[in-house]
Image (cartoon, rainbow, N blue to C red):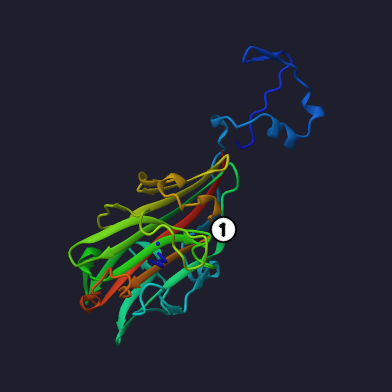
Amino acid sequence: MKQASKLICLMAIYLTSPIILSCKKIEQKPTADIPVDQIAARTGPKLSNQVSAWSRIFTDDFTNSGSFSNWTKANRADYNSSLCVYDPNVPVIGNYDSRSVLVLTATPNGGTYKSGLVKSNFSFKPGVNEEYRTSASIKLIALDGTTWKDFAQTYGAWPAFWTVQETNWPVQGEIDIMEGYSFGNSAKYASNLFYGSSANNNQLGNTCEKPYGVNSGWHTYDEYWKNENGNITVTIQLDGVTVSSYTNAINGNLKLQNFGPHNIIFNLNVGSNNNIGIFNNSQINLFSKTMLWVDYVTVDKRTL
């Protein structure tokens, strides 16, 4: 979202009988003679069938205002649009579609727009032979008086679900799981990565932007962030279907090994600065209000 131009514990099988590998007879030592950490180091890459089960390490169901102890509410203008001012009073817990949800609402406010952004106090990064899965159920919608409007009918709304380390951005990277852009009867959605070796210097441009289609209603967005023997892969899924996958091969300047630790952010931006030029700000139309609803967000971890 923030743009400046955006294995394994191997199965060591120690048998009492000899093991033949590459036609060589390997003498086996009793495992009691070798520290556990040295066993893992000596036995090489871990077998793929040893992947552990997912373990839940963070969850927020937004059932009441106590959820906000997990989050910091922004009180600033958006990085990409001086027209959008984040007010810490905007994020609230509401009830829609028979669900208790996080509600971020964007509304006109004189010559600017008032909206909301929350950033998790929790941060994470996969170690070697670890994988994290970050999931959220999200709905985008607008209201014109008492009439519901599809998100695509608005113009100039820019919601996002992303993970990032904001300090010295983008030195520790940014992963955009979902960015939405409304253009009045049409909308665009995409994932993206940002990275640079120095602060405020995105070296990737938009080479990592991967558009995907989203219809109205509730959708589940997932980020899979995996470190397998030092090889980093980021995979984005929409409703369980992969829409993009990233490795360092996508751009010579990308260094996924330098990403993280990341916080989670939900925000609803409005408009764009002239140097970005995504929207014609004179055409912004949020109806009475445009909203981002989040039913839940979870983070799971497993060992590869």
Q: x, y percentage for residue 98?
A: 35, 61
The residue depicted at 38 percent of the width and 56 percent of the height is 192
Which residue extends farthest left? 185
User: Where residue 64 sits in the image (x, y, percent)?
Assistant: 48, 68
Q: Crowding near pointer 1: few (<14 within 10 Å), some, many (20+)?
A: some
| Above or below 69: residue 205 | above
Q: Which sits in the foreground, 291 or 264?
A: 264
Q: Is residue 38 above or below residue 226?
A: above
- Quarter of the picture containing the C terminus is top right
Q: Is residue 71 left or right of residue 109?
A: right
Q: Is residue 251 left or right of residue 197?
A: left
* Picture coordinates of residue 182, whole percent (x, y): 25, 66
Q: Amino acid at mark 1?
A: Pro
Q: Quadrant of residue 162?
A: bottom left
| Residue that badge 1 annotates | 261
Mark 1 secondary-structure assignment: loop
